[in-house]
Image: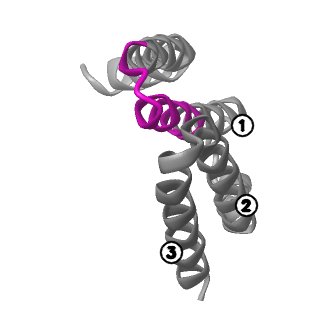
Amino acid sequence: MEIIKIIGIALIALVIIVMLKQYRPEYAIFITILTGVLILFLVMDRLTGIINLIQTIQSKSSINTQFIALLIKITGIAFLSEFAVSICKDSGESAIASKIELGSKIIIISMSVPIISGLLEIILKILP
């Protein structure tokens, strides 16, 4: 089970970080980043499977391919920004974390405008 690997890696990293913070606190953030990247690589196959499933569903339906691509990109931005925000908060930089959150929200909203306008067009066609 992959979750056991993820939890094991996280717990080992946690012990290393706690020990490092006593003697070399500047190296603890590197272990945090490395652990996060390692966990991302572990779940990459699952993410690829989800993207392939979404593309299969899209090819069988009449959903616009641009919308599916935008949804995948928006989801990726959300995951990556959450990862960066967590790292910033772990290192005590909550001000930078809040700026990343704000920037990612603005980017996500700007990228979702075509989807929102497409939905509004569909709603307007349905309404009398």
State which quarter of the image contains the C terminus. top left
Q: Amino acid at mark 1?
A: Thr
Give the magenta range.
79-95
In reply to whether residue 81 is colored magenta, the answer given is yes
Place of residue 29 in the rendered image (x, y in percent of width and height, measured from the top left): 59, 39
| Earlier sequence position, callout 2 versus callout 3 | 3
Q: Secondary structure at mark 1?
A: helix
Percent coordinates x, y for residue 24 in the rendering: 59, 42
Q: Is residue 18 visible?
A: yes
Asked if residue 19 is positioned above or below residue 70 in the image, the reply reads: below
Q: Which one is nearer the viewer's eye here, 19 or 86?
A: 19
Q: Amino acid at mark 3?
A: Ile
Q: Is residue 124 magenta?
A: no
> Where is mark 2, residue-wise?
44
Q: Amino acid at mark 2?
A: Met
**Disc 2 to disc 1, how far (Cα)?**
22 Å
Sequence-earlier tag: 2 or 1? 2
Question: Residue 7 shows which numbered tag?
Answer: 3
Of badges 1 and 3, the one in the foreground is 3
Q: How far from the left and from the top, in percent, is residue 87? A: 52, 36
Identify which residue is drawn at 59% across, 89% down: 1
49 lies above or below 25: below
Q: Mark 1 and mark 3: span between their CA atoms?
A: 36 Å
SS at circle 2 = helix
Residue name at image x 74 percent, y 54 percent? 59
Residue 108: assigned label: none
Q: Residue at x 70, y 50 (%)?
A: 34
Q: In this view of the protein, can residue 56 be seen by the observer?
A: no
Mark pair 2, 3: CA separation: 16 Å
Residue that label 1 marks:
65
